[in-house]
Amino acid sequence: MSRGRRGISAFAVALLLLATGCSQPEASRAESITLYTCVNDTTAQPVIAAFKAAHQGTDIQLFRAPTGQLNARVASDVRSGGLKADVIWACDPLTMQDFVTQGLVGGWTPQTEIPQAMRTPDYVGVALLYMVAITRKGQPAPAKWQNLADAGKVAVPDPKVAASALGALAYFGTDFYANLKSKGAVQVSTPDDVTTGVAQGLYDAGMTIANSAYAAAKSGSPVVVSWPKPGAVSIYGPVAVSKTTESRQLAQDFATYLASPDGQAVIGSSGSYPTLPNVAGPTKPDNAATVQPDWQALASEKAALLEDYAKLFGA
């Protein structure tokens, strides 16, 4: 009798182990999400580390690339069966709106005190980029953006590659760039390429992001950072959750963290500008003026803008 009971018990345990084994992959997947972002590693990695420290047992798989490559990755996912990211943290709202229009992300946002101007029903801005002017020491810093064309050899970043450059194009329009081109301006790939080129004396001036310009100046590069009138172009980077994620709670938790005071503090301390008011961030002049495009009005004009720009600086 005891042998029979042991046999039944062993069989029951085997069934239990089998059931547990079958369910385990689902539990593991529920504790891991994939993040797609164009945010640089100096910000993305500290944010991920802080979130994981506060959410023990979770993991975040990261794909990080400039906006152009991020778009290509998403397009590849769509062609091969669907978006593989659980969360997308983009660097400009025009890019994110494209993903919303394709039905890939959206339909939920976290509760947050981030200003309404950087929120929609589908995504919320959690970091800011400021497009500023950078000049080599000895060159006149432009008081107005219109003066940039007369600052010598000027470099601009590619709006097909960098979200900040796309935001600047959205604000200034192609006439501004046509004037720059007529005065000899050249296009490079990223804002960092502009900063490096000015620091090395390849260019006299250019348009770059404030983070990059101030970092170069702090490291001793012979550059000057200015915020020409009417102001630096402000571009907010939104976060959104995939509509098809199988780890919705964890994805929402991560988005909520990015928009929370704790997450915003990490973003600010790691070199990016937070969107939550009164959270400390990188260098910004007192009373610095900023401007921004009408993002909603421009959402349907992105392709036309890039097409017109390509006629100036090439595809």
Image: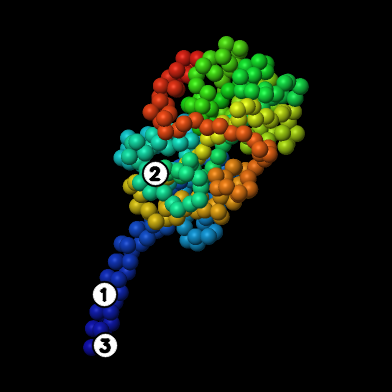
Q: Which mark is residue 2?
A: 3
Left or right of 114, for residue 84 = left
Q: Nearer the viewer, residue 8 or 235?
A: 235
**Residue in view at x 38 percent, y 49 percent:** 108
Distance of label 2 from label 1 (alpha carbons): 50 Å
Left or right of 8, for residue 299 = right
Considering the numbered disc 3 on the image, is that residue within a helix, a strand or a loop? helix
Considering the numbered disc 1 on the image, is that residue within a helix, a strand or a loop? helix
**Residue in view at x 56 percent, y 25 percent:** 157
Distance of label 1 from label 3 (alpha carbons): 14 Å
**Quarter of the image holding residue 24?**
bottom left
Q: Which residue is mark 2?
A: 122
In the displayed orientation, state which residue is furthest to the bottom. 1
Q: Amino acid at mark 2?
A: Asp
Q: Earlier in the sequence, mark 1 or mark 3?
A: 3
> Which quadrant of the figure contains the N terminus?
bottom left
Q: Which residue is mark 1?
A: 11
**Residue in view at x 55 percent, y 34 percent:** 234
Distance of label 3 from label 2 (alpha carbons): 62 Å
Residue 207 drawn at (x, y percent): 61, 26
Relative to 267, say whether 310 is above or below.
above
Q: Amino acid at mark 1?
A: Phe
Residue 306 drawn at (x, y percent): 45, 22
Left or right of 93, for residue 148 = right
Please tell me how crowded label 3 is: few (under 14), some (14-19), or many (20+) other residues with Cα within 10 Å: few
Q: For marks 2 and 1, give the one nearer the viewer.
A: 2
